[in-house]
Structures are given as structure tokens and as C-alpha cells.
Amino acid sequence: MVKLATNVNDPIGDLLTRIRNANLAYKDDLVVPASKMNRAVLQILATEGYIEAFEQEGEGIERVLRVTLKYSKKRERTISGLKRISKPGRRLYTGHDRLPRVLGGLGIAIVSTSQGVMTDKDASRKGIGGEILAYVW
């Protein structure tokens, strides 16, 4: 069984850092703590094609999410970069009319809205703003 650190002040930052480090080391999979927010962010990354898949393992307090990273046939990374935007010390909120475009639309911004966690494109389509969690490209 995998033991994970539980004293994390920024769970989303921890998730993104684990993905970034595993991606830079060309790991095939990694393990992150299970939470609703981590599951929502990973669902967006899987839907947008940045990761292969993720699944829950364990029971009760020992639940973890095993993330399978995605690479091309020549072992090129699908995730070029991850950047945490809104941090615990400085939250960043935006309206639907001022949602950011990452690399001119080539990347995505992950936004936490009143209707759940979604990409900047989905939030713009629905006409809602929220907290900008991260950029992925």
C-alpha cells in the first residue's frame, strides 16, 4: 500500500507538482491523494487528452488515485507545462468576459465555478466566471 503525505496546504498545487515531476521523469504512472477536487481536475485533464486515465485504489482513508500519463509514440510529452495560478495566499477570480486564453487557445485554463470545475472554454460557453486554478499546455 502507498503512504502519502497528509499535511498539504495546497492540494491542487501538490497534484500539479506530482504530475509535472512524473512527466519530466518520463514515469508511466503516479499516485496522488484521492479527493473530489483532485478527481475533477484529473477528469478535465483526461477529457482534454493530457493524461491517459486515472482510477481510484484503496478503501476509506487510504484511498488514492493512480494517474496514467500519456506520451506520443516517440515518447514525447503531451503536457508541456503546468502552472498554478490561484494560490492559497492569493486567490484569483475572474468574470466570464475576462477568462484567460492559454497560448492563444492551444492550452487550457482550469476554472472552479459555481457549477463545478471546468475548462475556460466551457465556462465561457456557459457565461460564468470563477477562480482560475491552473494553466495547462
Image (cartoon, rainbow, N blue to C red):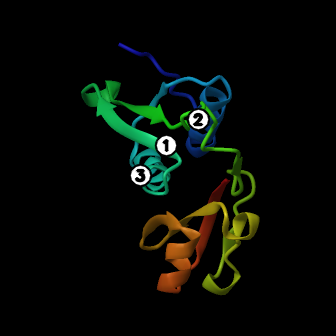
Check disc 2 and report the residue beneath it: 19
Query: Furthest residue to the left?
Result: 59
Asked which secondary structure carries label 2, the reply is helix
Horizontal and vertical percent position of residue 40: 42, 53
Q: In this rendered view, identify the residue nearer to me: 45 or 87.
A: 45
Amino acid under disc 1: Ile
> CB under 8 Å between callouts 1 and 2?
yes
* Quadrant of the drawing holding the N terminus: top left
Q: Which disc is residue 77 wearing?
A: none
Amino acid under disc 3: Gln
Q: Mark 2 packing: few (<14 Cα in 10 Å), some, or many (20+)?
A: many
Q: Which disc is residue 51 wearing?
A: 1
> CB under 8 Å between callouts 3 and 2?
no
Question: N-terminal of the two: label 3 or label 1?
Answer: 3
Q: In this rendered view, identify the residue nearer to me: 122 or 95.
A: 122
Query: Furthest residue to the top?
Result: 1
Horizontal and vertical percent position of residue 110: 58, 61
Q: Mark 1 packing: few (<14 Cα in 10 Å), some, or many (20+)?
A: many
The image quadrant of residue 14 is top right
In this image, 16 relative to 123: left or right? right
Residue 115 drawn above or below residue 42: below
Cα separation between marks 3 and 2: 14 Å
In this image, 110 relative to 34: left or right? right
Question: N-terminal of the two: label 3 or label 2?
Answer: 2
Cα separation between marks 1 and 2: 9 Å
Horizontal and vertical percent position of residue 83: 71, 49
Horizontal and vertical percent position of residue 16: 61, 41
Residue at the spot x=54%, y=34% of the render?
Answer: 73
Check disc 3 and report the residue beneath it: 43
